Amino acid sequence: MNNGRMWLVVNPTVGIPIFLGAVAVGSFAVHVAVLSNTTWVDDFLSGRPLGSSAAIESPTNLAEKASGVQTSQVQIGDLKDGATVVLPDGRRARLVIEEPALETARVEKPPTAPN
């Protein structure tokens, strides 16, 4: 054992329980972090399809992400018109929500040989 001399300083009846306790606390902390920061674990454990209980992005969340500042008030009309975001310091920002443009593939016919 490479570190066998450690047990000359620390009694094994004290050192081994402390080491195993530290491993258990670390493992517990990792599991709590995974369960509290993901949505797919709850779906997996309950047998639902993954992503079925994921939070739907609300316009408020989209506005907060776009502005980089937590908004205090969001006024939303029709989503096609966008949204007005009122920042905590009173400034207003206009958030425009556009649907992605769909590009259609252009298929060109190969040239035909003259007869």
Image: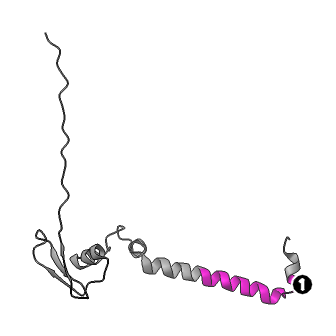
Badge 1 element: helix
Q: Name the foreground residue: 72 vs 45.
A: 72
Residue at the outermost top position: 115
Check disc 1 and report the residue beneath it. Answer: 8
The N terminus: image quadrant = bottom right
Magenta stretch mostly in which secondary structure?
Answer: helix
Query: What residue is at 87 percent from the left and 86 percent from the top?
Result: 9
Magenta stretch: residue 101 in it?
no
Q: Characterize the local packing of mark 1: few (<14), some (14-19) or many (20 or more) Cα atoms within 10 angstroms.
A: few
Magenta stretch: residue 8 in it?
yes
- In this rendering, the answer to whether 81 lies above or below 14 is above
**For the magenta stretch, what is the residue range?**
7-26
How far from the left and from the top, in percent, is residue 8? 89, 84
Q: Quadrant of residue 94?
A: bottom left
How far from the left and from the top, in percent, is residue 4? 87, 76
The C terminus: image quadrant = top left
In the image, what residue type sits under mark 1?
Leu
Query: What residue is at 17 percent from the left and 28 percent from the top?
Result: 109
Q: Quadrant of residue 61?
A: bottom left
